[in-house]
Amino acid sequence: MVAQALNLGILTAMFFIIGMIKPKWPLFFMEKPNRFLILVISTILFMISATMFGEGHRQEKNEKATKEALTQPQAPVPVPVPTAPEATKPAAPNKTAP
């Protein structure tokens, strides 16, 4: 995703530079393009490319951390074995009743 963000950033810079020089070229489909519209579109594209760049780096960092965690050997953790309480004989019924 980082490569796509860089490509979009380069296209945004080209769009901005060409649009500030000749607004009619990037906005060829409009009758009266102006430089303010070029600025607005460039700002939006820049925010999108910056977000893509940041998210791409975050994903790469998470993947790298996951791979490192999986490749490190895990030491076995000693687990205590529970012991069962000794069985006691059931109490004899009380036969003192008449």
Image: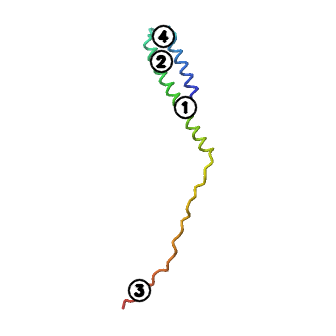
Amino acid beneath label 4 = Met
Amino acid beneath label 3 = Asn
Q: Which residue is drawn at 46% across and 21% down?
A: 44
Among numbered discs 4 and 2, the one appearing first in the sequence: 4
Q: Give the x, y percent position of residue 76.
A: 60, 54
Number of the front mark, 4 or 1: 1
Q: Give the x, y percent position of residue 27.
A: 49, 12
Q: Tell how many labels.
A: 4
Marks 1/2: CA distance? Answer: 22 Å
In the image, 45 versus 29, the foreground residue is 45
Q: Which mark is on residue 79?
A: none
Q: Which mark is on residue 20?
A: 4
The residue indicated by pointer 3 is 94
Among numbered discs 3 and 4, the one appearing first in the sequence: 4
Amino acid beneath label 1 = His
Quadrant position of the C terminus in the picture: bottom left
Q: In this view, does 41 lie above or below 95?
A: above
Marks 3/4: CA distance? Answer: 104 Å
Amino acid beneath label 2 = Ser
Do labels 4 and 2 touch, CB within 8 Å? no
Q: Give the x, y percent position of residue 92.
A: 45, 84
Among numbered discs 1 and 2, the one appearing first in the sequence: 2
